Amino acid sequence: MPESRHPMLRPVQSVSVFGLGKLGASMVGCFASAGMRTIGVDINPASVRAVNRGRAPVEEPGLQSLFTRYRRRISATRDAAAAVGTTDASFIIVPTPSRPDGSFNSRFVEQAVRTIGQALRNHRSYHLVVVTSTVLPGTMKQRILPVLERASGRLAGRDFGLCYSPEFIAIGNVIRGLLHPDFFLIGEHDSRAGSRLESIYRIQGGPRTPIVRMSMVNAELTKISVNTYVTGKIAFANQLARICDRLPGGDAFTVAQAVGLDHRIGPACLKPGPSFGGPCFPRDNRAFAAVARKRGLRAPAAEATIESNRAHTRFLQHYVEALKPAPSARLAVLGLSYRPGTGLLEESCAVELAHAWSVSGPVSVHDPLADPGEIRRRLPGCSRARTVPACIRNADIIVYATDHEAYRPIDLKHVARLAPGAILVDVWGRWASATTPDGLSYRTPGFQTANKHDTITSRGWKGPT
Ligand SMILES: NC(=O)c1ccc[n+]([C@@H]2O[C@H](COP(=O)([O-])OP(=O)(O)OC[C@H]3O[C@@H](n4cnc5c(N)ncnc54)[C@H](O)[C@@H]3O)[C@@H](O)[C@H]2O)c1
């Protein structure tokens, strides 16, 4: 039944967000920006303290300015009952770590749900519970719903609402992803809960953003399907790079660009570069394959994507090793995080490469956003440089591994002066159409510089950017 046909429900004015991590803290800022009083709940006292002092508990572009601007509407607590008791809806965005078989462990979600359920025992008005953490198909109905009903002593659909509503965001671009998503996905236990959540998303996303409603199990499958499909596109573009590397005259950037012009395919995420990594892509892919296996099936497409991604990291490793003038040549790696705009090093291609290269020779690394301690922990065999010049000075090979905004001002003439005779391996194809200054050699995996005339100039595309 649509929200409007439930006259006893006043519009949602306040929400709780359980989990003040990379995603949850951003949700707090975005709900507050949409006018809702927002209470963050976390078991970590430092995160709660930070929020109550007006500080964003995690680094994410644009987040602190939301916390500053909407401070009046934002607070935090460790007291779940107080938060549930004074808000209309609770969102749960706590970790769901991967198990060795690729499936997810939902125990943190269950813990959060249990405390919410206990708080709902004495709650007389309708409260909506929304799980945003990524969970596997079947988890909501088989695990979350029973925990919530048992802890609350109440009935979903009648006394409280339950939805599964994951977000599709990329770290470094979370605020934009939350405020302007391609669509909002609602997996609903019942239509009343779905309508309630739809009313929140209408406040947050305005009237134009599509809202897709379905059962909880289908929403669970949709979430991991999106990431599995997107990683398939990235792996395909990287496969093109490996083929073009062996194809005289091959240019994977031009081919991928043309392939993406087909309306059935589209250009997004279809560009050669590093292997995909980070906290979501690889693990959602593995989870998709695990979901199939659990049902006695194989998921060959997802498995091939994982294998192709591994093969790409190996390809990049050997590509650079083959360029070394001597086994002990000095390597410099610019950028370590798994994507631009974040300092996260989880399953990062650049980290894996730097580690592999450091086994045979000196490797200096730099990342403008990654935590120095984390770099030291993951790359004990590399030397961490504080600045770009310190990283590349006198290097034999410079690998441009993460296309950070902070690297925009890099000038190749300056690079040539700091590392005379060096080879620049540009994994992103950033300088493929630029003139290479004397004293510097240039390589882009999958792109041969002699091919510049092949680019799709009629569309204004002048080569890899
Ligand atoms: N980070 C991403 O790019 C991304 C994207 C889409 C989906 N997700 C999913 O979002 C979920 C959370 O991811 P994240 O990156 O924000 O995690 P995170 O590790 O950055 O933060 C999780 C937070 O939850 C808190 N927490 C743990 N148990 C709690 C409890 N019982 N009550 C209250 N707080 C609790 C932790 O203290 C921490 O602050 C995961 O399921 C992840 O798969 C993440």
Image: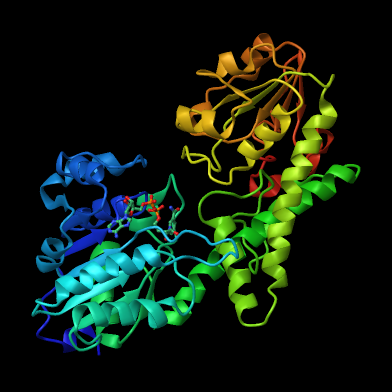
- Residue 208 visible in the snapshot: no
> Which corner quadrant holds the N terminus?
bottom left
The number of numbered badges drawn on the structure is: 0
Residue at 22% x, 67% y: name it.
115
Residue 133 image point, x, y percent: 39, 64
In depth, the one of 383 and 397 nearer the eye is: 383
Q: Is residue 317 positioned above or below 406 on the image?
A: below
Q: Quadrant of ligand 1?
A: bottom left
Find residue 126 and report its image quarter: bottom left
Q: Is residue 38 positioned above or below 367 on the image?
A: below
Residue at 8% x, 80% y: name it.
124
Q: Is residue 64 positioned above or below 326 on the image?
A: below
Find residue 454 and report its image quarter: top right
In depth, the one of 379 and 449 nearer the eye is: 379
> Which corner quadrant holds the C terminus?
top right
Left-right relation of 207 to 134: left
Residue at 48% x, 69% y: name it.
223
Residue 204 image point, x, y percent: 26, 62
Residue 350 image point, x, y percent: 63, 37
Residue 317 image point, x, y percent: 76, 37
Left-right relation of 171 to 75: right
